Each structure stands twice: as C-alpha cells, then as structure tokens.
Image: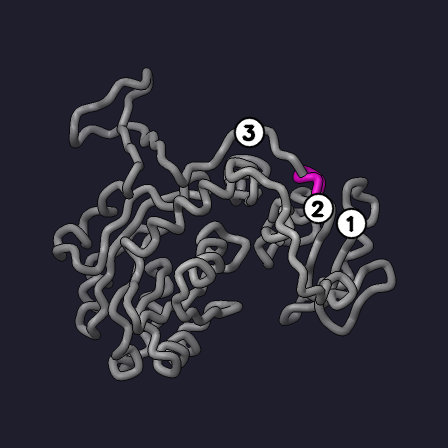
Amino acid sequence: MLLTGAVLVPIVHIYGPNEVRFILEQSGAKVLVQPDRWRSVEYGDRVAVYSDIPTLEHVVVVGDAVPADACEWKEFVTTTSVYMPPTVHADDVALLIYTSGTTSAPKGVQHSHNSLLAEQRSAPQYLGAGDDAVQLVSFPPGHIAGVGSVLRPLLHGHDTVYMDTWDPSLAVELIARHHVTATSGTPFHLAGMLDLGDVAGKLATMREFLIGAATVPEELVRRAATVGISTYRCYGSTEQPTITSGSAVDPEVARLGTDGSPLPGVRVRIVDEVGADVPTGTDGEVVTRGPDQFVATEMRV
C-alpha cells in the first residue's frame, strides 16, 4: 500500500467492529483490507457493519468466503510489470496508527516517510545484525513495533520469521528450526519460553532479546543469561518508536538497570510542572524530540 502512495492505517487484529468502525470513520479510510476469517473470528460478517461509512469505497477480503458487497483480493491486485512511482514528498504522512486509547478514545498518530525511515536507520545499531542474523517477530502488524518489524527486513535484508499469534512452545520450535539469533518482546514473552523447562538446546542460536513495555525483573534477565541470551531494554512509544535503547554488548549493570542511551539525533529532558529541567535523580515529566517522532500536520488522504 505504501508503494501506491496511500496512507497506511494498520489495525490490531483483535479489535472488534466498534473499534474498527471508529478508526475507519475518524481516519477517512477509503479502502479496508481484511481476511475472510482468522481463527474463530468471522471477519466477513462485519462487512455490512461498515457499509454506511461515507468515505469507505471498497472492502477487500482475502480468502474464499467473500461477501457479495466486498471485493476479492485477486480483483484488487494488478499484475502489471510497469510501476509508476506516486508523487509524494518525504514529509508527507505515510502511516496513521492508533494508540490503545487508555484515557479516552483511540488516538491516531501520524508518521511521515522520513520519520519511519529515521527509525529504520537506527535499528541496526541496537537490533541483532550480522551475516547470519535471523529475527523472530511476535508483535502484530497493527502495533508500531509490528510495523517496524515488517519494514525492517525489506530495508535491511535480514531473514525474518513471523508469528500470527504468541505461543511460547511454537516460538521455541521456530527459533530452533530457523536458527533465530534475535527477537524482541515483553517479559511475558521471554518468561513464557524459559518456563517451558529444558529449552537451552533449542535456544542455542538465540543471542539477544530486546525486552520492554513492562517492568523487567532482574531474575528474568539472569535466567536468560544461563541459556546464552543477552537481554537489554529500550524505551519508546507510538509517537516516537525508539527513544533510547541498550545493546546486547552493554555491561550487565546497564542492561539490568537502564533503558539504554538516546539514539542518534534524539534529545531527552526531564522537566517539572512549568517545563524547567529537574536535577538528576528527581522525578519529572519525560519530554523528547528526535527524527523518528510523529508529525503534527494535516493529513491528506
């Protein structure tokens, strides 16, 4: 979709029709692409729910069970070998991605081509690299971490293994089968694999685990080290995907107790209620600025 010049609006697959409708209406989406079903969810039954959204011109369904008022994916895809690049500017909005809306309705965050590429340029500095690099991805594409995980192999050429839902047993099997060297996730993901028991042999190729999004217990970090996995933390948000990050080669004290250092071009300040910097060791509000930060421009769809 990005290659057509369209603004991509990824939606987390577990959202129900009410959440999806809200996003479609607020974003002014013209095309919705969805499967006919995924696991026990019949997405095809939802097509009629969106029929009165004024901006929505097409619902494209991938699969065999296509409702009468939807388009088949094969009808929507061109097979022409001639690609005409769209006329876009690097600062145009390329991605509109919604946060979880913990304080109210979900909020749309706009990223430009430049902000997405800035995030990807920094990725090799803190994610596993090397000629033998293979990454495992468990984040859904509707999450900002999932978006980055889809773009990363396209831009950097790393072999990548994707999971459509989290299953620690399957993750361990995939790591062993594909010789995965690095992955990322929350403490829940890492603990789930280690709790399976004797997995050291199957995790033999796994060198590093980028961990975050929740409090990271020191004991979990040390358990991972016993099977040869170096864990390190990062800090970011939908609005600015990676603000700080450690690396697998950092000293243990840094990996245990910090979220790493600001990435190139990123500034971080801790301020009080009037916006003045506070002394080191003092609580305050985190404010950041950097090249991968979202843009606050009027979106063109």
Q: Are marks 2 and 1 in contact (CB under 8 Å)?
A: yes
Furthest-front residue in this view = 82
Mark 3 lies on residue: 297
Dot 2 or dot 3, earlier in sequence: 2
Amino acid type, mark 1 = Tyr
Left or right of 263: which side holds 167? right
Q: Secondary structure at mark 2?
A: helix
Left or right of 134: which side holds 226? left
Q: Position of residue 248 (x, y in %)?
A: 21, 60
Q: Secondary structure at mark 1?
A: helix
Counting other residues with Cα less than 10 Å from the Cα at mark 2, is it few (<14), some (14-19), or many (20 or more)? some
Q: Secondary structure at mark 3?
A: loop
Amino acid type, mark 3 = Thr
Q: Are marks 2 and 3 in contact (CB under 8 Å)?
A: no
- Residue plotted at (13% across, 57% down): 252
Amino acid type, mark 2 = Arg
Label disc, if present, on residue 50 of the rendered structure? 1
Q: Position of residue 141 (x, y in %)?
A: 53, 57
In the rendered image, which quarter contains the C terminus?
top right
Mark 2 lies on residue: 21
Q: Are marks 1 and 3 in contact (CB under 8 Å)?
A: no
State the CA–CA distance, disc 2 to disc 3. Answer: 23 Å
Report the magenta stretch's main SS: helix
